[in-house]
């Protein structure tokens, strides 16, 4: 694929990637959104979606209490129904990692990883030293997943080598202690061509996951963006036999949206990606809607938000 | 790891009431045929009879033409144009209101997936009426002089591949321009036309402006040969189109013919490959390939042949064939046993001539008419499957080395209806578009239709255009 | 020693065909006698055969790619050049028209002048017809969609009889200004202006083969032209209704567009020999 990782070589490689026709890609994504998922498939999809949620709180106002609350929700999303699976991970800022980890361990959530956003999330505008320390702190505090942001400024000015090198270095810091999720912030990359290029840059640099957005920029995980990223992991697999995960984040608020994401995964990357090891959904409000829809399927009548917990 | 099998998501058929038998719609009323005969129409997805439909004989056709003539001279040609337009607006609105009913009925009678009848056929049909409604009082801008005149009574014969949409393509411009019509739907797909007759009644369209006579080829011939018909509008095969052209030779009858095609879909090596693959799929597998403008000849640049084929096969494996009423079905039933036999015959010929066949892995239902999406590689221009219209989900793959060769091969056909070209290089797209001898060029897209966009072919693909100002003008004569 | 004017014998013109830019005789070797308006023999133009027609179609087809690809500006200038050349040859054409049609000097002169002006009119259309007949179409979706008229290809013209030059010029100018190439069968009875006009075309920078002129019997040539699979359209204005029906029946073989015109000066003369092409392209980033 590439002979070396020099700026020139990366540039040359990214140029070989086929362009994306925005209208065609959007039309295909929209067509897949018309798939109608019913009954047993829907029940399966809701549970799968719950297990893929990276339950997230990334606020300036986050407190230990808030973090403990979402950890409780993560372990047991529906206190009245123990058949509901736990979520995929809890995602917090690095100063909250220790609280989240401790809290999860206390309440039987040892298996749930804590993901930390890092590298001067969400803007990424800091020196490398700061970004590295951010990452090290999170890992030391018990983060098993690092959600780093790429340097969009460097990407947009064509300094692909810088973007690449930074990912490589953060990946080295993660070592075997943490998975690396690379946030492209597609809302700032704007074009689908850029989404495709950034996806490859991240995969080549060692990302375990490519993630759409920080959630702080709109648009975030639009269907065409996720579609193009799923194509990228599919094609990267056929070139390297390595499966890279995908994580849409931002804007996926209800069950319908989540199921559309699963349809995209199923028909673009393929059913091999339909598991929390290769697909995650970064969300907060989504989980309650999944629970409501799950109740409707289970009970046969429409549920009320009064019966799911607000955390 | 679990498979994400979609459970069947069937559209309800409760929305349609299919009668046991249908009569002819003449002069605003449903009347029993003078022939006394009825023929069955079946659901091609399960071969069950849906209803019996009247077979119009020459007396019935004559009655219909007279009704149309009476409506033309007494009512329709005298009505202020803006008022005429309002009837079309009404029809458009009723079609929107009853869209789901039409979609379900279309899918039952034709076999096409509900997703397509629901999202393409019926919305576009309504759009055609809405678009042409607005033309009714602006005909002096149609490019046919200051005082254009309608022909009078138009005989319209439509095919089975887009029954309701083709009806709209025909009826909307004819009525907008002040003509009255005698329309014959295809014998395997009469039901939505007969439901449209009910819409005409609901819209209180004056009696005789639209007459619908059902039947097969003989009924069509009666319309074509009727001396009271001023213009023929036909969509169907080139073979029948030629028969019609012969029949009207030496007469004053006008004609619009939308006939067959063997469209090339050219993929250059600088194309947006993933969207091109999508375009290939949409080009040939849309509507089971029952599309006159289908991209049935894939011309792929030789240096990306393997990559494109690999991606195409992966994509084709995701095509869902099955019950047309399932909202997740991509490919429905072949419309008739006769069409299925024709597809099979050409596919056999393709194999015998040495092309290599690959079909998408999918289970075909036990009842009904089905054909798995199929591609042939190693096809050359001399093969029958590269020259004859298959009208089914069968793609022939050919290669080319240079842009010039691509254009030469694309144009090397007696047809000239449509063509596709895929490249991210703007100048190459325009270079190709200007050299392709076809009436519709889809560049970096395929099988797109719109009431505002003229459609129709060069060479043996027919005479005239439908849609847009150009299509409208085909229903008008200069008054000098 | 020079002869006196009264002693000099005129050098008469041999009226030949015009195919592929050359002036051959009919391959059949046949000629026919054209009479003047009083019934006296005037000339022996070629009686074109089906093989001459075939050769003319080959010439027209091979001229089509370059002529249709020439800029409209260029085509317009060449038609205008034909008008200039016709103006200069007026006298000869007036003489021929008087002899053939038996009209007055005034009437013949007016016909030639009208023909010049008609050429100028069609010359001006070359780069405007697409503006008038084309359109951008506001489709419902993110697509740029435009329609543009394109020349249909090779057109056979059966020119109407009188006024012979005007009918001939009007028919061919309308056909070729858009980029078509033509085979034009001159009026059987009044062919001489057509041949003289061929000499004008030969000296007007009109590429060889764009216009090919046959003289002879329409009755003989109609079935061959109508059934010829490499002719795309026919201007049947000069045919009888019986010949027209025959042409329509034979023309079904390749669904020829067969048209009849009543006016020399009409945009339909151009548009009837064009096909509308509609192009779609997505609009995106």
Image: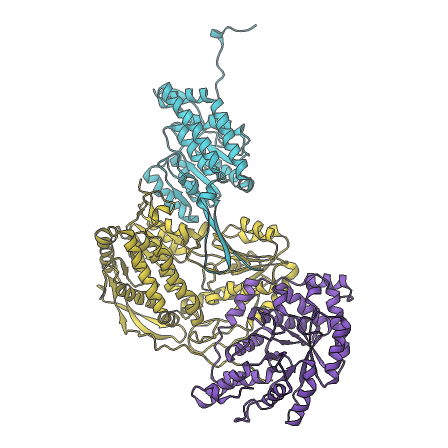
Chain colours: A purple, B yellow, C cyan
* Residue B21: image location, x then y, percent: 27, 71
Q: Is residue B226 visible?
A: yes
- Viewer-side residue, C180 vs C16: C180
- Viewer-side residue, C171 vs A82: A82
Q: Is B421 on the left or on the right of A138, as rendered?
A: left
* Residue C79: image location, x then y, percent: 50, 32
The residue drawn where x is 59% and y is 65% is: B274
The quadrant of the rendering that contains the C terminus of chain B is top left
- Viewer-side residue, C61 vs A214: A214
* Residue A176: image location, x then y, percent: 75, 82
- Viewer-side residue, B247 vs A287: A287
The residue drawn where x is 42% and y is 49% is: C255
- Which of the 4 quarters of the picture holds residue A203? bottom right
Note whether C238 is above or below A123 in the view shown.
above
The quadrant of the rendering that contains the N terminus of chain B is bottom right
Note whether A284 is above or below C210 in the view shown.
below
Q: Is residue C24 visible?
A: no
Q: Is A281 on the left or on the right of C101, as rendered?
A: right
- Which of the 4 quarters of the picture holds residue B164? bottom left
Q: How many marks?
A: 0
Q: Is B327 on the left or on the right of B174, as rendered?
A: right
* Residue B305: image location, x then y, percent: 63, 62
The residue drawn where x is 44% and y is 45% is: C133
Note whether B102 is above or below C59 in the view shown.
below
């Amino acid at each position: 694929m590439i002979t070396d990782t020099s700026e020139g070589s990366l540039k040359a490689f990214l140029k070989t990637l086929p362009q994306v026709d925005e209208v065609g890609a959007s039309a295909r994504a929209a067509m897949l959104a018309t798939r109608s998922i019913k009954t047993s498939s829907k029940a399966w999809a809701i549970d799968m979606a719950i297990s893929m949620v990276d339950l997230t709180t990334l606020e300036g106002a986050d407190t230990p209490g808030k973090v403990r609350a979402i950890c409780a929700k993560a372990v047991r999303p529906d206190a009245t129904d123990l058949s509901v699976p736990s979520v995929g991970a809890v995602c917090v800022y690095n100063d909250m990692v220790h609280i989240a980890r401790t809290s999860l361990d206390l309440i039987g959530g040892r298996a749930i990883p804590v993901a930390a956003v890092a590298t001067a999330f969400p803007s990424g505008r800091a020196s490398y030293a700061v970004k590295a320390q951010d990452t090290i702190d999170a890992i030391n505090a018990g983060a098993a997943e690092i959600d780093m942001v790429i340097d969009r400024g460097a990407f947009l000015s064509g300094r692909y080598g810088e973007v690449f090198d930074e990912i490589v270095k953060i990946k080295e810091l993660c070592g075997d202690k943490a998975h690396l999720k690379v946030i492209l912030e597609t809302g700032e990359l704007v074009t689908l061509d850029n989404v495709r290029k950034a996806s490859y840059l991240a995969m080549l640099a060692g990302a375990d996951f490519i993630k759409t957005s920080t959630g702080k920029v709109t648009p975030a995980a639009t269907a065409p963006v996720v579609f193009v990223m799923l194509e990228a992991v599919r094609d990267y697999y056929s070139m390297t036999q390595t499966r890279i995960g995908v994580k849409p984040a931002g804007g996926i608020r209800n069950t319908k949206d989540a199921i559309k994401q699963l349809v995209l995964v199923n028909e673009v990357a393929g059913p091999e990606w339909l598991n929390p090891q290769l697909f995650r959904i970064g969300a907060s409000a989504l989980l309650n809607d999944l629970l409501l829809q799950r109740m409707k399927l289970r009970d046969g009548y429409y549920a009320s938000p009064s019966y799911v917990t607000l955390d | 790891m679990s498979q994400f099998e979609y459970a069947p998501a069937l559209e309800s058929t409760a929305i349609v009431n299919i009668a046991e038998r249908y009569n002819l719609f003449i002069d605003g009323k449903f009347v029993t045929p003078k022939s006394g005969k009825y023929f069955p129409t079946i659901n091609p997805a399960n071969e069950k009879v849906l209803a019996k439909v009247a077979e119009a004989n020459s007396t019935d056709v004559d009655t219909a033409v007279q009704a149309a003539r009476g409506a033309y001279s007494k009512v329709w040609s005298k009505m202020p144009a803006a008022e005429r337009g309002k009837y079309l607006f009404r029809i458009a609105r009723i079609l929107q209101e009853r869209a789901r009913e039409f979609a379900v009925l279309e899918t039952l009678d034709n076999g096409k997936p509900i997703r397509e009848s629901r999202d393409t056929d019926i919305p576009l049909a309504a759009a055609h009426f809405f678009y042409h409604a607005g033309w009714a009082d602006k005909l002096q801008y149609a490019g046919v002089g200051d005082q254009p005149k309608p022909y009078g009574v138009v005989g319209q014969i439509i095919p089975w591949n887009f029954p309701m949409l083709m009806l709209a393509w025909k009826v909307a411009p004819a009525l907008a321009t002040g003509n009255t019509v005698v329309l014959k739907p295809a014998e395997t797909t009469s039901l939505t036309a007969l439901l449209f007759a009910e819409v005409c009644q609901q819209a209180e369209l004056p009696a005789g402006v639209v007459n619908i006579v059902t039947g097969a080829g003989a009924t069509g011939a009666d319309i074509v040969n009727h001396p009271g018909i001023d213009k023929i509008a036909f969509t169907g095969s080139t073979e029948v189109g030629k028969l019609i052209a012969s029949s009207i030779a030496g007469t004053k009858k006008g004609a619009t013919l939308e006939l067959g095609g063997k469209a090339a879909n050219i993929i250059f090596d600088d194309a947006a490959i993933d969207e091109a693959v999508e375009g290939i799929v949409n080009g040939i597998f849309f509507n089971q390939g029952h599309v006159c403008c289908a991209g049935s000849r894939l011309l792929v640049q030789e240096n990306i042949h393997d990559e494109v084929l690999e991606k195409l096969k992966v994509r084709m494996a995701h095509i869902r064939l099955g019950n047309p009423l399932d909202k997740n079905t991509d490919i429905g039933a072949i419309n008739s046993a006769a069409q299925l036999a024709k597809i099979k015959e050409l596919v056999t010929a393709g194999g015998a001539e040495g092309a290599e066949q690959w079909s998408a892995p999918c289970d075909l239902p036990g009842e009904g008419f089905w054909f798995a999406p199929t591609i042939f590689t190693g096809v050359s221009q001399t093969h029958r499957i590269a020259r004859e219209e298959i009208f089914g989900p069968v793609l022939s793959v050919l290669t080319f080395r240079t842009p010039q060769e691509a254009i030469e091969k694309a144009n090397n056909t007696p047809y000239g209806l449509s063509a596709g070209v895929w490249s991210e290089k703007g100048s190459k797209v325009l270079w190709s578009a200007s050299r392709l001898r076809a009436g519709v060029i889809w560049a970096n897209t395929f099988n797109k239709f719109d009431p505002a966009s003229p459609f129709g072919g060069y060479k043996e693909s027919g005479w005239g255009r439908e849609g847009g100002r150009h299509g409208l003008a085909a229903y008008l004569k200069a008054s000098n | 020693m020079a002869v006196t004017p009264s002693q000099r014998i005129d050098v008469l013109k041999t009226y030949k065909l015009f195919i592929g830019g050359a002036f051959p005789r009919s391959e059949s070797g046949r000629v026919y006698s054209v009479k003047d308006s009083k019934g006296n023999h005037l000339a022996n133009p070629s009686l074109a055969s089906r093989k001459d027609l075939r050769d003319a179609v080959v010439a027209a087809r091979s001229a089509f790619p370059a002529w249709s690809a020439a800029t409209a500006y260029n085509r317009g200038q060449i038609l205008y050049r034909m008008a200039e050349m016709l103006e200069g040859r007026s006298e000869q054409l007036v003489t021929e028209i008087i002899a053939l049609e038996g009209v007055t000097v005034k009437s013949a002169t007016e016909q030639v002048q009208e023909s010049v002006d008609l050429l100028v009119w069609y010359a001006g259309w070359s780069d405007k017809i697409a503006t008038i007949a084309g359109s951008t179409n506001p489709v419902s979706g993110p697509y740029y969609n435009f329609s543009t008229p394109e020349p249909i290809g090779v057109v056979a013209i059966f020119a109407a009889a009188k006024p012979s030059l005007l009918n001939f010029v009007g028919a061919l100018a309308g056909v070729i200004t858009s980029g078509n190439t033509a085979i034009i069968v001159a009026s059987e009875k009044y062919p001489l202006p057509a041949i003289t006009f061929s000499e004008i075309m030969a000296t007007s920078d009109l590429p060889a083969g764009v216009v090919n002129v046959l003289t002879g019997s329409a009755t003989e040539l109609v079935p061959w032209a109508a059934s010829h699979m490499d002719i795309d359209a026919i201007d049947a204005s000069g045919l009888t209704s019986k010949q027209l029906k025959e042409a329509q029946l034979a023309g079904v073989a390749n669904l020829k567009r067969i048209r009849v015109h009543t006016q020399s000066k009409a945009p339909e003369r151009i548009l009837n020999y064009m096909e509308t092409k509609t192009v779609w392209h997505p609009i995106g980033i």
